[in-house]
Amino acid sequence: MSNDFQAEVRTMASLRHENVVRLLGFCLHQNVESGQQEQILVYEFVGNGDLKYHIHHSKSMVNLPF
């Protein structure tokens, strides 16, 4: 497991905020065909679509004061 991946897992696992999706776990998988290791982060499910959709397709845009 790379140092960058370990650091990301530790950081995301330590975050506790109502606006941050919680990290549930991670998985390391060795791809038999390519020989490469896949690093996967598993986050909690968040309903109502993804953030990209809400940013780009929102009918009620909010103007921020900055």
Image (cartoon, rainbow, N blue to C red):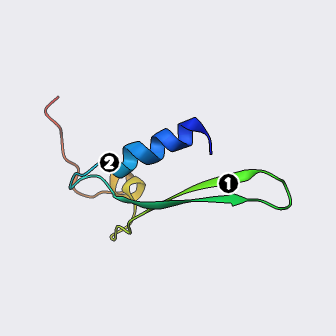
Specify whether 2 is left or right of 6.
Answer: right
Which of the two residues, 35 or 61, is positioned nearer the viewer here? 35
Question: Residue at left 77%, top 50%?
Answer: 36
Tag 2's secondary structure? helix
- Secondary structure type for disc 1: strand
x, y (%) of residue 24? 41, 63
Q: Is residue 48 toward the left or the right of residue 7 in the image?
A: left
State which quarter of the image contains the C terminus. top left
- Identify the residue at image location x=62%, y=45%: 1
Outermost residue on the right side: it is 33
- Which corner quadrant of the image does residue 44 belong to? bottom left
Q: For the residues carrying marks 2 and 1, which lies nearer the camera in this image?
A: 2
**Residue at label 1?**
38
Q: CA distance from mark 2 to mark 1?
A: 22 Å
The answer to which of marks 2 and 1 sits earlier in the sequence is 2
Q: Amino acid at mark 2?
A: Ser
Total marks shown come to: 2
| Residue drawn at point x = 36 percent, y = 57 percent | 57
Left or right of 32, for residue 61: left
- Residue at numbered disc 2: 14
The amino acid type, in three-letter code, at marker 1 is Glu
